[in-house]
């Protein structure tokens, strides 16, 4: 009994230390953060919200709508600010920047499987992330309209704050990981100029048939798919109305909430730099100029030269020229005969 009491005292001290660190993070924030919970149907998103609030207050209440089975229970955009769940007597503690939880309808994996560039899930998440939907918006009806490719009229005067952090909730009971849905979520977290931190909660660990090693492998596989660090993952079991408070469970949950409240993790709007197209260089401009056309010079063809009057051979067809040539050959032949026979005598 004494050992149990000592262990509980140690756990309580640890919880108190984490609570002090959590308060330090909350005080460093300029305003409460908006935490959006995303996941498919039945993963325990709403139950996790109630679990976090139970760890904070020590009392379980149905702050978020909880359902069972294969039908949607959360049908609306449900925002739960700290004013609804945090009301301590100490005014100093009451002023903490505790987060606003945003609970939404379970996302259907089939609505991420689309040949279109933008799936229904992407469109729905984009509207929520940018704060373009009102509180209590009927998300089931909106999803059907997006399926039918209806144009949604956005009200420009909405005062809904944008999302600061995304928490993806998956159940350890499910053997199949919704890769396509996770891809859509991570894509929207970094859409255009947005860069929103993404965390992961693996619920129902107590109901999973996987061993401790198997759960660790599952966690690492999901981290690889989502491209996030294991540091951003919480594996837990959710509180139920009839469950007694557990200091061990509270410690893990408050540690995770401390990370979510860390000022280092924040949504960033990327600033795009203005630019101008580069001017073409002189060399490129010169190479693109048309080649100069060839200018043909004017000229006159010279007249053929006339033979000089004193030239001995004026015309090869002249009869006198032919006769003279024959006589010369005949004389040369006779001289050759004389010399030949004279040498023999």
Image (cartoon, grey):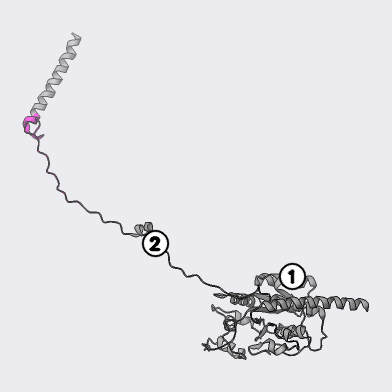
* Residue 332 pos. (x, y %): 14, 20
Left or right relative to 345: residue 54: right
Identity of the residue drawn at 83% across and 78% down: 12
Q: In which quarter of the image is residue 22?
A: bottom right
Separation of marks 1 and 2 at Cα, in angstroms: 55 Å
Left or right relative to 104: residue 285: left
| Residue 217 - label | 1
Which one is in front, 23 or 290?
23
* Residue 287 pos. (x, y %): 35, 57
Quadrant in the picture for the N terminus = bottom right
| Residue 99 - label | none
Q: Name the residue under label 2.
A: 280
Does residue 83 appear in this view?
yes
State the extent of the magenta-drawn residues as a range. 297-322
The 10 Å Cα crowd at callout 2, few under 14, some 14 to 19, many 20 or more, is few
Taking the view exactly as shown, the residue that stands out farthest to the right is 1
| Residue 303 is covered by the magenta coloring | yes
**What secondary structure is the stretch in magenta mostly built from?**
loop
| Residue 136 is covered by the magenta coloring | no
Q: Quadrant of residue 289?
A: bottom left
């Amino acid at each position: 009994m004494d050992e149990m009491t000592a262990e509980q005292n140690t756990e309580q001290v640890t919880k108190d230390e984490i609570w002090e660190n959590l308060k330090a993070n909350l005080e460093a924030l300029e305003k409460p953060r908006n935490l959006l919970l995303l996941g498919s149907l039945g993963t325990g998103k709403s139950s996790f919200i109630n679990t976090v609030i139970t760890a904070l207050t020590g009392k379980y209440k149905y702050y978020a709508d909880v359902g069972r089975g294969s039908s949607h229970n959360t049908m609306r955009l449900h925002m739960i600010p700290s004013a609804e769940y945090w009301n301590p007597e100490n005014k100093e503690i009451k002023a903490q920047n505790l987060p606003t939880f945003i609970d939404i309808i379970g996302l259907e994996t089939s609505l991420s499987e689309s040949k279109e560039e933008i799936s229904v899930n992407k469109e729905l998440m984009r509207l929520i992330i940018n704060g373009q939907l009102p509180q209590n918006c009927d998300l089931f009806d909106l999803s059907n309209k997006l399926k039918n490719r209806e144009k949604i009229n956005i009200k420009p005067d909405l005062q809904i704050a944008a999302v600061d952090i995304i928490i993806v909730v998956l159940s350890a009971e499910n053997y199949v990981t919704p890769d396509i849905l996770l891809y859509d979520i991570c894509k929207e977290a970094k859409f255009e100029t947005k860069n929103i931190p993404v965390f992961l909660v693996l619920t129902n660990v107590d109901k999973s048939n996987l061993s401790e090693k198997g759960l660790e492998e599952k966690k690492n596989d999901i981290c690889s798919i989502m491209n996030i660090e294991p540091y951003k993952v919480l594996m837990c079991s959710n509180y139920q109305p009839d469950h007694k408070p557990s200091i061990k469970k509270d410690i893990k949950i408050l540690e995770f909430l401390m990370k979510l409240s860390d000022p280092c993790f924040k949504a960033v709007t990327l600033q795009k730099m203005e630019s101008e197209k580069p001017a073409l260089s002189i060399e490129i401009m010169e190479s693109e100029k048309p080649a100069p056309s060839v200018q043909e010079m004017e000229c006159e063809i010279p007249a053929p030269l006339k033979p000089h009057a004193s030239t001995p051979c004026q015309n090869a067809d002249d009869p006198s020229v032919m006769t003279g040539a024959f006589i010369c050959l005949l004389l040369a032949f006779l001289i050759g005969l004389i010399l030949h026979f004279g040498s023999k005598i």
